[in-house]
C-alpha cells in the first residue's frame, strides 16, 4: 500500500448514542441482549456485541427529537481538508 493510500481518511465505525434515564437498568437490559460494557463513567457508557457499539448517555429529560451518532475516522485531519472546500 502506498503512503498516499495510507493517508486517505476512512470511516471505520459508527455508534449511535441513546439517552437513558437509568444507566444501571439500561446496562442490565442490554446485558440480557448479549452486550458487554466496554466503558462506563458517571453518566456515559459504551457497550458492544459482535463488533457493534452503542453509546448510552444518562439524562433525566427525554430525547428532544434529535439523535447523536459517533463516527470513528482514521486520519481525521485529511478528512477535514477533504471536506473543507465543500
Image: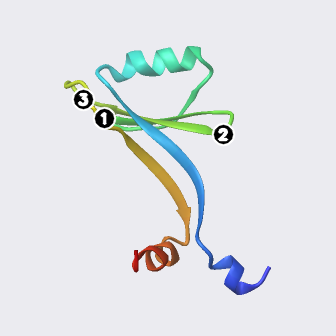
Q: In what element is the residue under mark 2?
A: loop
Query: Which residue position holds label 1?
Result: 43
Query: Is residue 57 positioned above or below 73 on the image?
Result: above
Q: Position of residue 1 (x, y in %)?
A: 80, 79
User: Which mark lies nearer to you, 2 or 1?
Assistant: 2
Q: In what element is the residue under mark 1?
A: loop
Q: Quadrant of the C terminus?
A: bottom left
Q: Are marks 2 and 1 in contact (CB under 8 Å)?
A: no
Query: Which residue position holds label 2?
Result: 51
Whichever of callouts 2 and 1 sits on the residue coming sooner in the sequence is: 1
Question: CA gap, disc 2 to disc 1?
Answer: 23 Å
Question: CA gap, disc 3 to disc 1?
Answer: 8 Å
Residue placed most toward the observer, 66 or 15: 66
User: Which mark lies nearer to you, 3 or 1?
Assistant: 3
Give the left or right position of residue 3, taking residue 64 as reference: right
Q: In what element is the residue under mark 3?
A: loop
Q: Residue furthest right?
A: 1
Residue placed most toward the observer, 19 or 41: 19
Residue placed most toward the observer, 86 or 2: 86
Query: Is residue 42 positioned above or below 86 on the image?
Result: above
Question: For the residue carrying disc 1, how many other residues have a C-alpha within 10 Å: few (<14), some (14-19), or many (20+)?
Answer: few
Labelled disc at residue 59: 3
Q: Which residue lies at the image location 30% right of the left edge and 37% below the top edge?
A: 66
Question: For the residue carrying disc 3, how many other residues have a C-alpha within 10 Å: few (<14), some (14-19), or many (20+)?
Answer: some
Q: Position of residue 20 (x, y in %)?
A: 33, 24
Q: Position of residue 53 (x, y in %)?
A: 55, 38
Q: Residue furthest left?
A: 61
Residue 19, by quadrant, is top left
Question: CA gap, disc 2 to disc 3?
Answer: 26 Å
Give the left or right position of residue 44, taking residue 16 as reference: left
Amino acid at each position: 500500500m502506498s503512503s498516499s493510500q495510507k493517508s486517505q481518511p476512512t470511516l471505520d465505525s459508527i455508534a449511535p448514542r441513546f439517552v437513558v434515564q437509568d444507566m444501571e437498568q439500561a446496562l442490565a437490559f442490554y446485558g440480557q441482549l448479549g452486550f458487554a460494557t466496554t466503558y462506563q463513567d458517571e453518566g456515559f457508557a459504551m457497550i458492544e456485541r459482535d463488533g457493534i457499539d452503542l453509546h448510552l448517555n444518562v439524562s433525566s429529560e427525554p430525547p428532544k427529537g434529535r439523535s447523536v451518532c459517533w463516527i470513528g475516522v482514521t486520519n481525521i485531519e485529511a478528512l477535514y481538508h477533504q471536506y473543507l472546500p465543500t
